[in-house]
Image (tube, rainbow, N blue to C red):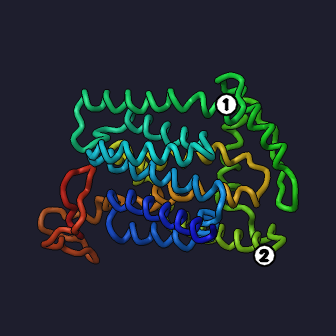
Amino acid sequence: MYRISALIGIAAVLYFFRAFALFQPTRSAKAYALLLFFLPSFSVWSCILGKDSLAALGLALISYGYAIWLKGCHGRAMAHIVVGLVVVGVVRPHMALIGLIGAFLVEIICRGAAVRGTVLGKIIRVVAVSAMLYLLGPLTQDFVGLDENTATAALGRMDISTQGNQYGGSAVETPTISTPLQMALFFPSGVVRVLFRPFPWEANNFNAALAALENLFIAYLVLRRLRHLPGLFVGIRGRPYSCYCLIVAFELLVILGPTPNLGLLSRERTQLLPFFFAFLLTGHSMPQSRRRFGNVWEPGSHPPAKTLVPFESPERGHAVPTL
């Protein structure tokens, strides 16, 4: 069973990697693969028999299906998406719903969400995703125990879950969140909790110390990429897969942020990290100051290569020159 679970986790990494590599250069794709293969909170929990390994594989299949959907392979895409929905829907229907909501919003807000997109094709895709949301919605509502589809009911159910998980040596205080405004005010603290806690001085056992070291690495990675974040947000509508990862990561940060148990949070953020890293490692455009002006190049810059890198940019539909 351990071997089967390990194979499930490896399959999840491969599908996440294949989806990311369709849209990013080799260097970024390699860094992405290394993070998923060797970062403890993902590599451990996605390879242990239980809900986490199946949820990781299901979300990976949905992500890969939507990635090739964006490339125009609609038949293969639907097959992967449906299988992914079934796999993750068996254990966590609400996570399947999160993936579909991400795809739905991307189809609405992004320009040219498919390489061969037309107005009619976009309408068909939006209708298809809407139909899947309509079918999955009632299952998710029953799974999480919602009596009605309102923000107040959802927050009330989240508060009950929060109180039930506030135990053990890794429990932390979480304020009562009963309104969308309170959720919005708590969101920054929730992001810090999900990505960076426990802090090193909060570690009280070996597992907590390992999680704290991983959090330090994530903080270092975020700081290294901080100067690129404005470039990632600018033009996000023209990068549909990056937009998809950003939306799903945002949804998961909202849901996981109020979790009052840092040990549980370290396990559950397995679902978040592939999307967070995919957005964080997205290739950015070269700054304007480094581009050629006439026939003159700035000191320290390099002339353009005479060949093209061997990958296709789906957002542009052509190969990208190496600088």
In whole angstroms, how far apart are the C-alphas of marks 1 and 2?
Answer: 38 Å
Rendering coords of residue 131 (x, y %): 44, 28
Secondary element type, mark 2: helix
Q: Quadrant of residue 147?
A: top right
Amino acid type of the residue that numbered disc 1 sits on in the rendered structure: Asp
- Relative to 73, 169 lies left or right: right
Give the label on residue 206, or none: 2
**Labels 1 and 2: the sequence-earlier one:** 1
Q: Nearer the viewer, residue 23 or 81?
A: 81
Crowd around label 2: few <14 · some 14–19 · many ≥20 (10 Å): few
Q: Residue at x 24, y 64 (%)?
A: 311
- Counting every numbered tag in the picture gives 2
Residue at x 53% of width, y 48% of height: 87
Residue 133, image x, y percentages: 49, 31
Describe residue 158's horizontal placement relative to residue 228 as left or right: right
Q: Is residue 320 left or right of residue 91?
A: left
Q: Vertically, is 166 above or below 153?
A: below
Report which residue position mark 1 lands on: 142
Q: Quadrant of residue 255?
A: top right
Which residue does the image show at 26% across and 45% down from the upper left? 72
